[in-house]
Image (cartoon, rainbow, N blue to C red):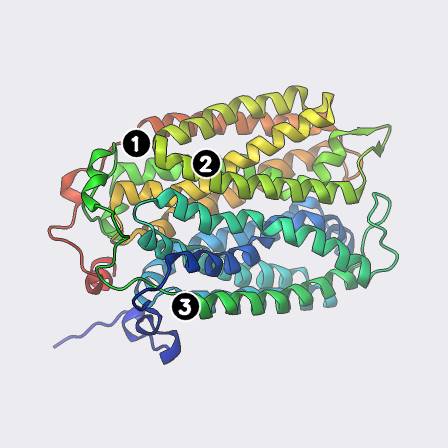
Amino acid sequence: MCVTLTISEVTVLPVFLSRERTVAGPGFSRWLIPPAALAVHLCIGQVYATSVYKTALVEHFDSSQTAIGVIFSIAIVMLGLSAAVMGTWVDRNGPRAAMTAAAVFWASGFFIGALGIGTGQLWLVYLGYGFIGGIGLGIGYISPVSTLIKWFPDRPGLATGMAIMGFGGGAMIASPLSGRLLSLYDPSYTGDATTVPDGHAVMMLFLTLGVVYLVFMSFGAATVRVPAEGWAPAGWDPASVKEKKLVTTASVSARNAVLTRSFWLVWIVLFCNVTAGIGILEQAAPMIQDFFRSDGTSSVSAVAAGGFVGLLSIANMGGRFVWSSTSDVIGRRPIYMMYLGVGLVLYLLLATVGHASMALFVLLAVVILSFYGGGFATVPAYLRDLFGTFQVGAIHGRLLTAWSAAGIAGPLIINAFLDAQGEPGTLTAAAYRPALLTMVGLLAVGFIANLLVHQVPDRFHEPTAADPSTTERSAA
């Protein structure tokens, strides 16, 4: 007799982390779950604030923008890959075990990254913040999403918006906090465009953030719960979803989902939307300074640029909640038509006339980033509509490989064009135009892909109603 065991089948967890210990009791309020999700997503959302200390790392390692941008790209690549690989494990073992694992990986990434900065070894920053921290990003990103969808089957767009809103808002906290800590650790850093914090200050920043995030993410892990089997919100009729276009009541396994055309069309949609926004986010602080530079001097201070990063974070966060909630009313495909179609026009305006007025530049960037965030928050509900709730967490994890690809493409496009145009501190708005026009083309491709999304054929549905105990067998 031959017995084959997968890694997931021999996983042993401490009792307090097991899924059984996280099942909510009678009378538990589902509104206690969003704070637990936010505790994790607000922490891992710090990845969007890396532009605050990007210039400091360029100078500390005497490197190029592209080489430092690789840190961010590795983190996003590992986010998508770890979410894809660990999605089924997260679904089976529950959010508490997943959030705890995410906290350990994310904090460890900061600690190892700090060691790399302190010793002048850039590869350690790649390994720590990029590779190890990126694993924490992926596990932490998907761990609350499927749980919230199960708690809010009547409003999946609202649910995913609440969960992913925190990821977009993480930079809103991390950006000003990082600026203050950098000034504390390097008194010569004044926060204006003429000074750059030293490597020791960035190392201390990494150590501080690692400790703070470990504490807050552990709180989220300790307070999260999953609904009891058969639970449903009062007054909600599951049959009501049949009335909505592109929404299924059937179950599709993660294994079958990746065989469908709709999965890969949504993958293209997410890739195009993310690539178009992620390059700007990674370059946000230097970008606003470069757009309004004259005779080698920018009219935007480093402090104001940091505030711009925070504003984009607010737009990113608000878009995740507002637009994903709106999708519950108008549908997922129409909302993506807006993200991609209107976004295409806004990018074109940013490339051609964005430098004419700072108010116009900020307005365009804010709306674009609200669409970027909305696209992230709406996609789990889009997947739930197409494939059901059976293994939506695992399917979402696999789809996030689009984010991994975008994490390479977006910063690479922006940084490659900028490195070809000149040195940091000397660039102007014209240097960004080729990259922004490239993003316009990508959004057009995503718009067409979204129009081609249709319901999943019956042959991909599970033959019977899926039971949670079959998750491992169906997705192994």
Of tags 1 and 3, the one toward the viewer is: 3
Asked whether, in this view, residue 351 is left or right of residue 138, the answer is: right
Q: Amino acid at mark 2?
A: Trp
Q: CA distance from mark 2 to mark 3?
A: 28 Å
Q: Nearer the viewer, residue 418 or 350?
A: 350
Position of 101 relative to 15 (above/below): above
* Mark 1 or mark 2: whose residue is earlier in sequence: 2
Query: Residue 410, located in which quarter of the rendered image?
Result: top right
How packed mark 1 is, by other alpha carbons closer than 10 Å (few <14, some 14-19, many 20 or more), is: some
Q: Residue at x 53, y 21 (%)?
A: 345
Tell me the residue at 65%/25% (across/down): 433
Q: From the image, which quarter does the C terminus lie in?
A: bottom left
Question: Residue sitting at 62 percent across and 64 percent down?
Answer: 110
In this view, 16 is above or below 82: below
Helix or strand or loop: what does disc 1 sit on? Answer: loop
Q: Is residue 295 left or right of residue 104?
A: right
Q: Which mark is residue 96?
A: 3
**The residue tagged with tag 3: helix, strand or loop?**
helix
- Image coordinates of residue 304 in percent, x first then y, are 77, 41
Is residue 121 or residue 101 the one in the foreground? 101
Point out residue 228 in the picture as x, y percentages from the top left corner: 27, 64
Q: Are marks 1 and 3 in contact (CB under 8 Å)?
A: no
As helix, strand or loop, the secondary structure at mark 2 comes to helix
Amino acid type at image mark 1: Val
Pointer 1: what residue? 453
State the CA–CA distance, disc 1 to disc 3: 34 Å
- Which residue, given by chain and number where applicable, does mark 2 sit on? 323
User: Residue 300 bears which disc, if any?
Assistant: none
